[in-house]
Image: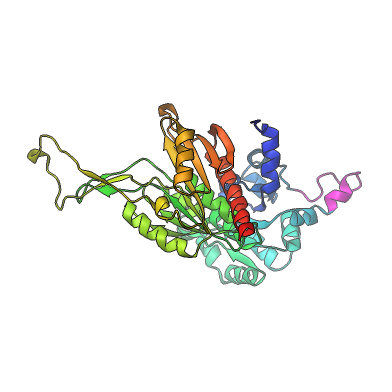
Amino acid sequence: MSRKSGTERQKLEAARAKTVLLGVTGGIAAYKACEIVRRLAEHGLAVQVVMTETATRFISPLTLATLSERPVWTDEFPQGIGTPASAQDVIAHIDLAEQADVFLLAPATANTIAKIAHGIADNLLTSTAVAWQGPALVAPAMNHRMYENPVTQENLQTLSQLGYTEIEPEEGWLACGETGPGRLASIGRIVSSVLTAIQEREGRLSGKRVVVTAGGTREPLDPVRFISNASTGFLALKCASALAAQGAHVDLVCGTGVNPELQEEAPADVAHVKTAAEMKSAVEKKVESCDALLMLAAVADFAPAPATHKIKKDEHETLNLKLQRTEDILWSLRERHDLVKIGVSLETEDALARARAKLRDKGLDAIIAVDYRAEEAPYGDVSIRAAVLTGEGEHLPLELRAKTELAGEIAHLTAILLDNKERQR
C-alpha cells in the first residue's frame, strides 16, 4: 500500500482545514500570540495573522509568520500606491475578511476595541475588522483600570451587539505590577472558544453527537492506594477537538491522568469519572442519544476488591491481590448497530492480528491498532506507532505518526462511517 508523500498530506490537510484570522494588537500580551498560533495549528487550523504597527514592536512578524507558515500582514499598502501589485493590496482587508472562517482578536487593546466598536478603519487590522462578516471573538488584555473603565465596557457591549463574543480576561498579576481583571484569557480558553465558534458553523458533522472517552481509570486497593496506568488522554482530546471542528457536538467522558489545560481546550461537555465502573455508567448514559462512540480511554481490564482500611505493611510480608475482570464497555454495546463505534487495541506483540480480532468480536466499525514498544511509550504528546483498521481493511497502515495528525484522520474517518450508516438506513 503506497504512502502519501509529505506534500500530498499537507494538501489533504489544507483542504480540510478551517482558517482563523488572528488580529494581534500592541500590548505586552502580544507575545502570547505565538502560543495561540501554535495551539490552533495543532488542532489542524490554518492561521492568518494580521498585526497592528504597534504590535510589531512587541513581537516580530517573522516569528508569527514562521509559526503560522503564512505571510503576516501589517500594512495596508505594502507595495506602495502606484506599483503593479497595488490594486490587490488596496483591497487586502476585503480579501483577508473573505478567506477566513473565524476572526479572533487576541490580545485586544482598549484602543483597537474602541476603534472597531465605532467603525474606525485607520489600519489594516481595523479595516479588516470592519469588513468582517462571520463569527468573531475578542480577548481583551490590558490594565484592570482600563478594562473596568465604563467606556471600555460600553465598547465591549457594542462589539457584543455586533456579534462578537468576548473571551473575558482573567484576574491576577498584571505587567504593571498591579492585580485585577485584565490578564489575557488562558490559551486553553481561547482555543476552546475558537473551536466552539467553528463548531457552530455548518460542518460535515453538524448535528451529530459523538462521545469520546479519555484518560485512564483508578481501581482502588484501599482508601489511599490504587492500580492505574500512565494514559494522559492526549489522543482522545485531540480527536474531540478535531470532531468539534467539523461541527460535531462532543461529550467527553474524562478519566484520570488527563492534562487539565488540554482538557480546557476541548470544546466538549465533560463528565469526570475515576473507576472503570464509573466510566461504564457514564458511557451508557451518554450513548443513549449519540451517533458515534470513540472509546479511547485506557480502562482497567482488572480491578481488586478494595480493603475497607489502609493496608499496613507491618501486617504483611507479602501481599497477594485477587483481581477480577472489569466489564468490557465496547463488548456490552456490540448490539448497538446504529452506533458508530471506534476502539483502541494496544499490544506488545501481534498488534494487527489482535486488533482485527477485537474489531470483529466487539462489532466495531474501526479500531486503532497500537504497536507498543518500550522505546516508544505511547503516553503524552508523542508520536505513536499505530494503524487504523476497518471492516474493509487498513484505513491507515502501521507506522509512527504524530497523534495530532492521527486525530485528524480519525475525525475524518468518523464522518465517513457516519455517512455510511446513513446510507444503510
Residue 353 against residue 208 in the figure, above or below: above
Residue 246 against residue 70 in the figure, above or below: below
Horizontally, residue 225 falls left or right of residue 242, namely left
Residue 77 against residue 162 in the figure, above or below: above
Image quarter (top left, top right, bottom left or bottom right) of the N terminus: top right
User: What colour-coding does the image apply?
Assistant: rainbow
Coordinates of residue 177 in the picture (x, y in percent)? 46, 53
Q: Please name the predominant secondary structure of the magenta segment in the image.
A: loop
Residue nearest the observer in this picture, 141 or 379 = 379
Residue at the image point whose x is 69% and y is 51% from the top:
52
Query: Residue extending furthest top?
Result: 375
Residue nearest the observer in this picture, 242 or 349 = 349
Residue nearest the observer in this picture, 341 or 136 = 341
Q: Is residue 417 magenta?
A: no
| Magenta span of residues | 75-90
Residue 78 position by quadrant: top right
Coordinates of residue 202 in the picture (x, y in percent)? 66, 61
Residue at the image point whose x is 39% and y is 45% from the top:
298
* Residue 246 visible in image: no
Horizontally, residue 34 falls left or right of residue 384, namely right
Image quarter (top left, top right, bottom left or bottom right) of the C terminus: bottom right
Residue 93 position by quadrant: bottom right
Coordinates of residue 167 in the picture (x, y in percent)? 55, 61
* Residue 359 visible in image: yes
Horizontally, residue 358 falls left or right of residue 127, namely left
